[in-house]
Image (spheres, rainbow, N blue to C red):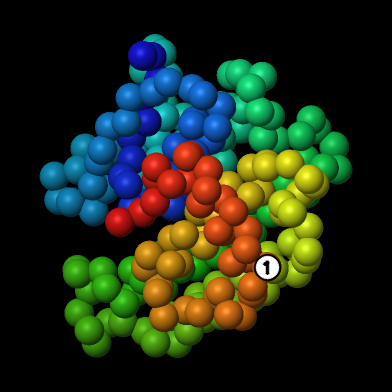
Amino acid sequence: MSLKLIGSRSSPYVRKVRIVMAEKKLDYQFVEEDVWADTTTIARANPLGKVPCLLMEGGEAVYDSRVIVEYLDTLSPVGRLIPVPGRERAEVKTCEALADGVMDAGVLARMEAIWPHRADSERSQAWIDRQLGKVHAGLMALSQGLGDKPFCSGIHLSLSDIAVGCALGWLEFRFPHIDWRSAHPNLARLQDKLMQRQSFADTRPG
Ligand code: GSF
């Protein structure tokens, strides 16, 4: 087994990579790392101190999740997840950026609220609200983009659906009070369909 993925089971970005690995039937070793622990050694592989980080055959590191999944998609012709360069590819990558952006805003809001190295007086509700506004705006745009189509981009599973499914699954896990299912029933339908896939079921956070 020559590919190693450093990550955690709760990270939605790591989940995106693990789902792509499973859909592409790629073999890898999962190396669990808690990047928030004082003892973390993640910076040896990724100076930014973040997961996911993919270690290639020779030990070279590849990050972040968008770069990793783009590389993985080239490794096997099984189930292409990203279209060839052109307009469809730009659409898929924009959908991924939107879903990732929902996760980014959610992570920022969560860290502002719970990061243990910050005193309560240093937490800003205005910042949390700003980030949660992006989560809600992102969900609205994802729902509008999906409409009544079977998948986010075209009629087959693509990286768009994987990224969106990871964002929705992570919101369910970390922000259970955000009722996106009632607000966007089409996203709920997509999520339920995705969860039938082994790759999604095997990587459910929490
Ligand atoms: C985001 C990775 C990230 O923030 C990507 O790979 O797509 N754009 C990057 N990872 C978090 C873990 S999580 O919130 O899922 C991380 O490693 N944070 C550690 C830190 O110090 O920010």
For image coordinates 31% across by 45% down, the residue present is 8
Q: Secondary structure at mark 1?
A: helix
Task: Tell me: 145 left or right of 74.
Answer: right
Q: Is residue 3 above or below residue 174?
A: above
Residue 163 visible to an observer of this rendering? no
- The residue singled out by tag 1 in the image is 186
Left or right position of 65 against 58: right
In the depicted structure, whether residue 4 falls above or below residue 121: above
The quadrant of the image that shows the N terminus is top left
Report x, y in % for residue 199. Answer: 48, 39
Q: Amino acid at mark 1?
A: Asn
On screen, 175 above or below 170?
A: below
Q: Quadrant of the C terminus?
A: bottom left
Q: Residue at x 64, y 42 (%)?
A: 159
Comparing 181 with 122, the one in front is: 181
Q: How many marks?
A: 1
Q: Position of residue 17 (x, y in %)?
A: 48, 38
Depth check: 141 or 122 in front?
141
Name the foreground residue: 145 vs 195: 195
Q: Residue at x 50, y 67 (%)?
A: 105
Query: Is residue 25 at least partly visible in the picture?
Result: yes
Q: Dot 1: within a 10 Å radius of its alpha carbon, few (fewer than 14), some, or many (20 or more) residues? A: some
The image position of residue 94, as x and y in percent, is: 71, 52
Query: What is the quadrant of residue 116 in the picture?
Result: bottom left
